[in-house]
Amino acid sequence: MIEHAEHSHPEECCGLLVGQIQGDRIAAIEVYPMANQWNLETGPEFEAAISAPKPATLPSRERRYTIDPRAMLEVQKLARDRGLTIVGVYHSHPEHPAIPSEYDRELAWADYVYPIVSVRRGYPSAVRVWQLDDDQQFVELELCEDLP
Ligand SMILES: [Zn+2]
C-alpha cells in the first residue's frame, strides 16, 4: 500500500485488501493494487461544473480515485475461490492528511475498512485506517501488525 502510494504520487493510488473477518478483527492477507480509473468526464462532478456560471476547478486523479467495478468483481471471485473476501479499499492522499474526505464518506461501504496513506512531497508519512459506524461517520480503527 505504502509503496503503491509512493509510486503513484502525485496522483492518488487505490487498491483492494483481501482477507477474512475474524470476530471483531479484520485480517488483511493480500493487497491488490488497482489502477486509478478516475476520469473527469465521467465523474459525477463534471455535469455540475460545466453548467456552473463560472468555470469550476474539477478534481483530477490527484484528488480522486475510482476502481473499475468489473476489476473489483474479478478480485472478489479470486478471493471467494479461496474462502477469502474483499475486506477493504485503500487509497492515498497526496499532500493531504490520512483523514477521509466528505467525498470518501459518501462513497464508502459499511462492509469495508478504508486505509488512507498520506504522501508528503513524494514520501509516505502516515497510514490510518477508517470504517463507517452505524451513523455513516468514519471512526479510526487500531492497526495491528501481528498475525493471528
Ligand atoms: Zn480520499
Image (cartoon, grey):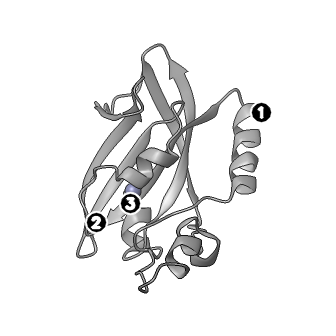
| Residue 50 shows in the view | yes
Q: Position of residue 41 (x, y in %)?
A: 62, 77
Placement of 73 over or under 121, stated as above or below: above
Placement of 33 over or under 146, stated as above or below: below
**Residue ID for mark 2:** 119
Number of callouts in the render? 3
Q: Are marks 2 and 3 in contact (CB under 8 Å)?
A: yes
Quarter placement of the N terminus: bottom left
Amino acid, disc 3: Ser
Instruction: Establish whether ligand 1 lies closer than 8 Å to the Cβ of label 3.
Output: no
Q: Secondary structure at mark 3?
A: strand
**Residue ID for mark 3:** 92
Cα gap from disc 1 to disc 3, whole angstroms: 29 Å
Amino acid, disc 1: Asp
Cα gap from disc 2 to disc 3, whole angstroms: 7 Å
Placement of 115 over or under 136, stated as above or below: below
Q: Position of residue 132 (x, y in %)?
A: 41, 32
Are there few (<14), some (14-19), or many (20+) residues within 10 Å of tag 3?
many
Quarter placement of the C terminus: top left
Front-most of 50 and 59?
A: 50
Q: Are marks 1 and 2 in contact (CB under 8 Å)?
A: no
Ligand 1 image position (quadrant) = bottom left
